[in-house]
Image (cartoon, rainbow, N blue to C red):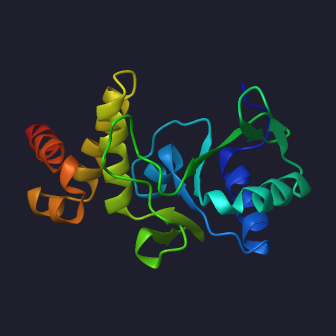
Amino acid sequence: MLGNETLWDVARRCHAALRNAEIPYAIAGGVAICLHGYQRNTVDLDLIVRSEDEAAIREALLEAGFEWSDSHREFRSSDGIPVQFLIAGSRTGRGAEAKFADPSAANSITVREDLPVLTLERLIEAKIACGAGDPRRTHKDFADVVELIAIHNLDSSFARHLHKSVRETYWELVKNARAG
């Protein structure tokens, strides 16, 4: 189990370290879901970063007291909270056409609680593509999207903001959200 350090503390420490090093990034995954209004449990921090920033990220996080875990290919806080990386431009899911947004692009991020987070459009897109490409993630990722649809009162017209490859699944998830 996690120690005394909270996931929010880790997010703020990472933010301070990366901001001070002038490294663009965006929060994704479960923490981004929470920042967009759906409160659910999560135990790690997922960050979208650019591959060219790898060395600078490593230096900034090591200096901030995080430890690199070779076996897990992630940083860990002193209490063991994982900080994992998704690479901008890489596919959002196995076989997906959609790709992770560049965190330096202003239209890819929004600020929530003073933290850079994927926009709702890019987050929903990533969750659908990831869930569609991995049967072990499908239920969790699609449930996240259904909850975001309900919380933000989204309808089928929101699909125009998503990559064309995830629109059909999005429309089905809208039906699920409305059925509840």
Residue under the image location 80 percent in, 42 percent down: 77
For the N terminus, the image quarter is top right
Q: Position of residue 97 (x, y in %)?
A: 30, 48
Tell me: 13 left or right of 90. Answer: right
Residue under the image location 49 percent in, 43 percent down: 30
Q: Position of residue 10 (x, y in %)?
A: 73, 50
Please tell me whether residue 78 is drawn above or below residue 19 in the rendered image.
above
Q: Position of residue 108 (x, y in %)?
A: 43, 69
Please identify the quarter of the rendering in which residue 50 is found: bottom right
Residue under the image location 74 percent in, 65 percent down: 18
| Residue closest to the eye, 4 or 155 | 155
Please identify the quarter of the rendering in which residue 132 is found: top left
Please tell me whether residue 32 is drawn above or below residue 128 in the rendered image.
below
| Residue closest to the eye, 13 or 41 | 13
Q: Position of residue 4 (x, y in %)?
A: 79, 38
Tell me: 81 left or right of 162. Answer: right
